[in-house]
Image: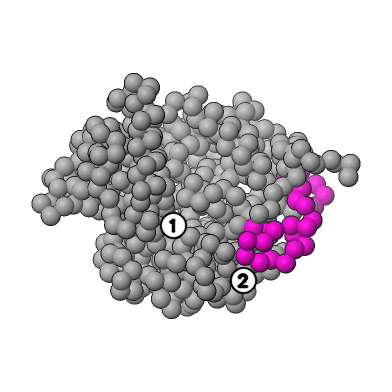
Amino acid sequence: REAIFAAIRSAHERLAAKDDAGAWLLGHGWSLDRLGDWPTAQDLDSLAPGRPSALWSHDHHSRWVSSAALDRAGIGEETPDPQGGMIRRDTDGRPSGMLHEHAAKLVSVAVPEPDRARLEAALSSYAAELARLGIVAVHDPGEMSDDPQIRRGPTFYRSLAEEGALPLRVAASIRPEQLAPAIERGFRSGGTHTAGSGSSAREDRPDPLAGRLAERYRGGWLKLFADGSLGSRSAALLEPYEEGSGEPVGGPAGMLLAPPEWLHERAQMAARAGIAVQIHGIGDAAVRSALDILEQLPSPADGIHHRVEHAQLVHPADVARFGAAGIAASVQPVHLVGDAPVARTAWGDRIRWSFPIHSLAAGGALIAFGTDAPVESPDPWPGIAIAVTRASATWAAGESAIYASESIDLARAIRAACLDPALTAGEADRGRLVSGHRADLVVVPAEMLDDDAVAAGALDRARPLATLLDGEVVYRDARFDPGD
């Protein structure tokens, strides 16, 4: 708690030193489990007096805001809770400074948007960091493109790609508030058309082996949210949270962020327009709801797959539905590292079905690993490692592996990190060493892969010697000699 508070004070003082009293203090990373209880606007006011501040929780499902931020956003005692969100209030009914789920968006309208130059600089820096980790392609779930007219996000990436300035591959998704204008502008999953002419006709796909810079942007999915998160206690469960695991948001079993009928309507609208759908589902109730919706959609064109995002807790009756329906499980096994202590308490024996990766694979599911950055580090290697070990050296002494029967071997984990994410996006020419495929490659020291997979072992700390994008070296370790 004190470390979090000290970091906030320090950030405020840095802004004050620039004599920028009105500048917003933005950030993320705090968690309920580290603070012990939900913080308030008064807490934040004491750390950054008079400053509009808005700080995302570690899981990006709750936003802690100051009194000045509440005022600028016009959030007061009479402001109703939005659908799929909750404004936490004090005993007098006044907003306490904690906005959960869709309520967090209420403050977004008051936060200034970064200009294009700042976005380009941030993307360039981030791409370099990703290359150092062996990553040359990302799936953006739409956080950058929160404006209804998609002026940013897909439009931003596409314009950079057309200028030959996009430093990595991006499949950019849209959010439901952008669906209608995106369809009008011709947005399609897998396509490069995003905005401009208003034509709904999809552009012809260029030669998939051409490797042109303009091809680095692709249309992603429509991202919908069925529930919240474990960290914010808003993941929707089929049965209530265990007693003593923290107050759930929305009720004893968490909350669905939107009625299934509403999600189904948007999903059908997207599918008819050639847009694949990904549905965020953490709890087993949300995963079931997502599967119910996605199973009814027509299969997208060009080999793209509908996806359930996270699938962190899956009821055993629903595991086989992924493979049977061709629905991809987009999972982030690295969440096992930080969430395991909370999940043991909040889910009890149900943790047996937390990230049931082996069972999903046995059922024929396409499994796409990710990191959920910036919720977690973009480093893919700890996630690959824990998918193999189901254990972490960061856990308290004596805590055993979480159902080692759900572990997978290293070859399957590497496939889930490289090939399957590309296949979910319809990119069959990436993700494996095959003649004629794109030369997106990573060189890893052999000992990292030969070492026995153990918690905190070599695999967990793996670092590439070189990373290539379209055959061009975009990262090389100083120790690496291609002639060796």
Which dot marks residue 104?
none
State which tag comes first along the sequence, 2 or 1: 1
Majority secondary structure of the magenta segment? loop
The type of residue carrying mark 2 is Ser
Please name the residue shown 75% across and 51% down the image: 444
Q: Is residue 346 left or right of residue 97?
A: right
Q: Is residue 22 left or right of residue 3?
A: left
**In the rendered image, which quarter is residue 144 located in?**
top left
Q: Is residue 472 left or right of residue 324?
A: right
How far apart, in angstroms, are the residues tagged by discs 2 and 1? 23 Å
Count the marks: how many? 2
Q: Residue furthest left?
A: 92
Q: Is residue 468 left or right of residue 345?
A: right
Judge whether 360 appears above or below 448 on screen.
below
The type of residue carrying mark 1 is His
Residues drawn in magenta: 434-460
Please name the residue shown 42% across and 51% down the image: 58
The x, y position of residue 27, in whole percent, is: 40, 40
Q: Secondary structure at mark 1?
A: strand
Mark toward the viewer: 2 or 1:
2
The x, y position of residue 229, in whole percent, is: 39, 59
Which is more toward the observer, 299 or 37?
Answer: 37
**In the rendered image, which quarter is residue 414 located in?**
bottom right
Which is more toward the observer, 4 or 247?
Answer: 4
Which is more toward the observer, 103 or 149?
Answer: 103
Q: Secondary structure at mark 2?
A: loop
Which dot marks residue 280?
1
**In the rendered image, which quarter is residue 300 located in?**
bottom right
Q: Which residue is mark 2?
A: 407
